[in-house]
Image (cartoon, grey):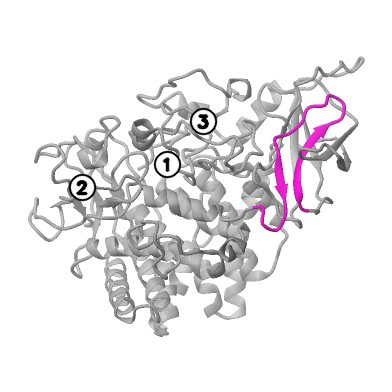
Amino acid sequence: MTGSSYVRLRLAGVLMAGLWGAVAATCAGTSGGVRPAVPADTVFVRVNLVGYLPGDAKVAVAFSEAPVHGAFTVVEEPAGAVVFQGEVRPAPAKGWGRFAHYYELDFSGLATPGRYRVRMEQTGDVSAPFTIGPDAYGAYHEDLLGFLRQQRCGYNPFLDRVCHRRDGRTFYGPVPDSTYLDVSGGWHDAGDQLKYLITGSNATARLLLAYLLEPDKFGDVVNDLGQPRPNGLPDVLDEARWGLDWLHKLHPEPHLLVHQVADDRDHIGWKWPDRDPSDYGWGPNSYRPAYVATGRPQGLRQYQSEATGMANLAGRFAAAMALAARLWQDLDPAFAAKCLAAAKSAYALGRAHEGYQQGNSYGAPYRYAERTWADDMEWGAAELYAVTRDPAYLADARRYARLAGATSWMPRDTTEHYEYYPFVNVGHFALYPHVDGAFRDTLAGYYRDGIEHALRRGQTNPFRIGVPFIWCSNNLATALITQILLYERMTGDTRYHDFMLAQRDWLLGRNPWGTSMFMSIPRDGEYPQDVHTSIWALTRREVPGGLVDGPVYATIFNSLRGLHLTAPDEFARFQNPYVVYHDDIGDYATNEPTMDGTAGAVYFMAHFGSAAHLAR
């Protein structure tokens, strides 16, 4: 789970309307009198550090403590020749924190490929460099797959080591406690070394969806073990297969579904995964618990999870397996048949136990607090119908779609941690091609409802970011991008496209801190480096591609246990009392890269990415 100690979050009294109202109150501009001169180096220009496709809306954000007026230009890098000039326009929304003045710099009319900076003509301040061109995003989506390989449990190609060979021994479920069950493999969840079906099922399914939607974007550089030798299979399918093989281990019998391996006894500091000193009762670096889903509350000590069923887990599991059955039909018919059988079995388990199973804790009251499940069963049923054409699955998918409706985090300014996981209901997209026009309108309307709520939130701030700053806000931004892209594929309606680009640009540098939220992307830009992981702490080797948790409300940051910065805050000038982000290994709330967040971003990065690298 994200964070070295995972936190159940209720953000009492922190509502976005109040947040932005308070921000506005601190950001009132100067009034009357002569405008003061703006000293050089005090206008900050934020752009997407990766860049823009030629047809994208391209809007930089500038902010300063004193008013700015006049023109801005876009200049070639490094020659400095002016290629575009525009007017500095005040942002329509109120400001952010201590800076009183925010401006939009729209250079959408510039489509000529090249390398550029935005320059404020009044002061000479310039942005970081960026690219415009059809290949601006290149193969960054492949970097995300590289990060996932670094998260592998079992054989880890980044470390060239094998870890956690003894996972695990069961608790709960139809077999006696401490029964050995081979659940080795999968991915470490974040900076810690736990493994969850909650996140692993979603990550696997999202990788398969990314390949299904963007099959021409993925190359073949590594083999199935992640070693640098091509094996004739796109690397995204190698990574998905790693997840699928682990999921099969979690469901070895029709009535047995493991949902978690290890618990917060893992959280004892930086450690090599193959020399894990965590002790679960069998000695250090030995067996770890494998928790079996029962649909009832669980917890080996006083802290009990909430649970009403297991359909959230079973539905996502079924969706991943049904997608695999479709994609491997020609690649490996026997494996495809195995996946289809597992999809049907898990789906039946979910149908018999509707409701949700949450993550487990041991010594702390913190867990993944998922509380939705109908969206997962809709996804599983829709994917099963796509591969079997059994009308019973279609009928189920329609029923679950109506149960899920527009349920989402998007209208809310506070939720519990992962309460609305997996943050975007892919089930509506999967069902859409299989229903009539009226039901298609209903499904599109569900997506639109959430997008409209996010759009209204985005209109309250100069960056047009549409997410609340709960823990893992970057995952929400990725989910919002994905929902809009899926909506466009479903309907052809592009009214939200520019809003979607604003969320993308936020993740890639058009934010108060001027940093990308992906490790080592772009390599010549500002990005998270001092990340909260054992790999970084012990090796000091950067791993491109990992998406960090992202900014949080200051109320969250100030309330978390064991959180401290290890160095002076390089972004101190850009923090405010309401939302913070730190590139610091001590900040597990904002600077910990997550496996599922990164997997969820593969599709949108591939969407903007290029297949040109495959020809080289």
Q: What residue type is labelled 3?
A: Gly
Which stretch appears magenta?
113-136
> Of helix, strand and loop, which one carries label 3?
loop
Q: Which of 508 and 175 is in front in this view?
A: 508
Q: Which of 67 and 356 is in front in this view?
A: 67
Q: Nearer the viewer, residue 235 or 449?
A: 235
Q: Where is residue 10, by image quadrant?
A: top left
> Is any atom of residue 193 visible in this view?
yes
Of the two numbered discs 1 and 2 on the same chain, state the one appearing first in sequence.
2
Query: Residue 151, position in %: x, y?
Result: 36, 48
* Residue 13: assigned label: 3
Number of residues whose C-alpha sits closer than 10 Å to that of mark 3, classed few (under 14), some (14–19) or many (20 or more):
few
Q: What residue type is labelled 1?
A: Glu
**Residue at the disc numbered 2:** 164
Left or right, residue 305 beside residue 112: left
Which of the two discs, 3 and 1, sits closer to the camera? 1
Q: Which amino acid does label 2 sit on?
A: His
Residue positioned 30% across, 48% down in the render: 160
Query: Residue 359, position in %: x, y?
Result: 30, 47
Q: Which of 301 and 58 is in front in this view?
A: 58
Labelled pair 3, 1 in contact (Cβ < 8 Å):
no
The N terminus lies in which quarter of the figure?
top left
In the displayed structure, 47 sits above or below 151; it is above
Number of residues whose C-alpha sits closer than 10 Å to that of mark 2, classed few (under 14), some (14–19) or many (20 or more):
many
> Is any atom of residue 370 visible in this view?
no
The C terminus lies in which quarter of the figure?
bottom right
Give the Cα separation between the discs numbered 2 and 3: 42 Å
